[in-house]
Structure formats: structure tokens, C-alpha cells
Image (cartoon, rainbow, N blue to C red):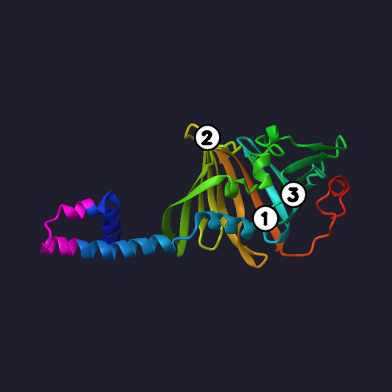
Amino acid sequence: MVLQNACALINSISDMRTFLRERKPGSKTRRIWIAAFGVFAMVCTGSKASDPDPKELIRAAMDQWRGTTSRSVMTMTIHRPGWERKMSMRAWTEGDKKSLVRVTAPRKDAGNGTLLDDKNMWTFSPKINRIIKVPSSMMSQSWLGSDFSNKDISKSTDIIHQYDHTLVEIRENDGHSEYLIEAIPHEDAAVVWGKEVLVIRDDKVLLKEEYWDQGGLLVKEMETTEIAEMGGRTVARTMRMSKVDAPEKWTEMTVDDIEFDLDLAANVFTLSNLRNPRQ
């Protein structure tokens, strides 16, 4: 607490030299202030220098979730007052550019798939036997009727490359350090949100992500409700997405099984495999 107060005092004085000139030259008080400023300035600067880079924290959390490659089995639960719907699905990823998600149950939804290759996204519906490319204007729309958008599923790296990041707070909770990061988009960034706020744990698990509109209002949030050791690493096993103005409506994505850093066939992330599954 003493250190925090000292650092706050130093930061609150906009011109240190002017402050010191106002002290009587040669006085004991002036010498004490000079010594104190020197010591605390070094300590405060060292403290800030040791803080992790918020951009690298976000990148590490994304890498932790995806690995070099991954293959997973998941259950998506869409909850509404009065009813609930579940879908089983399989997913594959490669780096931060490619992913494929395919619904396996229930039978009426089986075969529906989503393919992402860089910034291109396609969906396939066996009912109409058509592959449809998703235009950028539809990336904010619901994915498979859930509270996740097409953009959420794409897990784009826009938040790394098109945002400025500030480490707002470091807090201790349940034996872990948690990093609160504020991400503000660049002025020329083609993104929907006015701000995103993330909480990332020291073991690279994304605990929470808030989505704020251009007017400064919190619109929706994704929160990790279960953490587990899976595939040889600590991951967010269950994540819930909900809108602030309708908390009784939410969608949970639960990982039932996952493998990381495995060899995937060259044809996994193709339109042909999206339509006619070979994996």
C-alpha cells in the first residue's frame, strides 16, 4: 500500500523539476524529496516494466485454446425461457486462420457445417445441399440460432491486430493472477465494437470477455463457467455467451473432448470436405 501511494504521488506531479525547485535549495527537505523521488521512481518504473504485455496475453490465450492444430468434440446448449436445445458437434482448427465446425446431432441438424479460411467463411446446409459464402455484412448475425455470432465462431485475430491494449488491473484470485485488459479499436478499424474488456488468468485461460458498443454500453459478455485439464493443458471447458438486456437467454459451449498439436489431413479445410465429410 505504501508503494502504491508513493507511485501515485509521483505520477500525480506533472513536472517533478518544478516541484523540486519550489523546495528551498540545500534544505534537508529538498534532499529528502530528491532521494525519495529517485528511489520510488526506480521502483515504480521497474514495477511497470515487469508487467506482462496485454497484447501478448491475448495472443497466448488464443494459442492456448487452439494450439498449433486441434480436434474437439463439443456440445452447444441454447437456453431460452421455457425451452432448451442441444447440439453435438465436432471441430478442427489449424493456427489462427483455419477452422471447421460440423454438427453431428440431433439428426435434423446433422451435417450443417461452417468453414473458416483466413477472412473467408462458408456454411453448408444438407437440407438445401448448398455451400453459401458468408458476406462481411452477416458476420454479426447469429450462428446456428445461438447467442454466438458468426464473428465469435471465427475467433478472428482482429482484437490483436486492430486494437490498442491497456493492462488496467492485476488482481489475485484463488491462487492465480488475473489480468484485466481493455482493448480499444483503431480509428480506421472495420470492427463492430467500441471496446472489448477481457480477463485472462496467468495460466492463459480466458475467463471473461465483454463487448461494448460505440456508445459505451455493455451489450453482451462471454464468461468461463468451468475450467478443466484437457488435452494436456488447462482450458476453458464451458463458456457461456449472454446479452446484458436478456440474461435469461444464453448459449453455452462445452468441450467434451479435445486434442492438440496433431497431424491433420491436407483436405480438412476445404469446401469439398465441408460438403462431403471425409474427416
Residue 63 locus on image (x, y percent): 63, 58
Find disc 1 in the rendering and name its residue: 255
- In the rendered image, the quadrant that contains the N terminus is bottom left
Find disc 3 in the rendering and name its residue: 88
Q: Are marks 1 and 2 in contact (CB under 8 Å)?
A: no
Residue 278 placement, left or right of 159:
right
Find disc 2 in the rendering and name its residue: 213
Real-space Cα separation, disc 3 to disc 1, in angstroms? 10 Å
Residue 161 placement, left or right of 92:
left
Q: Secondary structure at mark 3?
A: strand
Vertical arrangement, residue 136 with respect to residue 32, above or below: above
Q: Is 152 or 246 nearer to us in this picture?
A: 152
User: Three-letter amino acid code at disc 2?
Assistant: Asp
State the extent of the magenta-drawn residues as a range: 18-33
Q: Main secondary structure of the magenta part?
A: helix
Real-space Cα separation, disc 1 to disc 2, in angstroms? 29 Å
Q: Secondary structure at mark 1?
A: strand
Residue 30 locus on image (x, y percent): 15, 60
Estimate how packed mark 2 is, as few (under 14), some (14 to 19) or many (20 or more) residues with alpha carbons within 10 Å: some
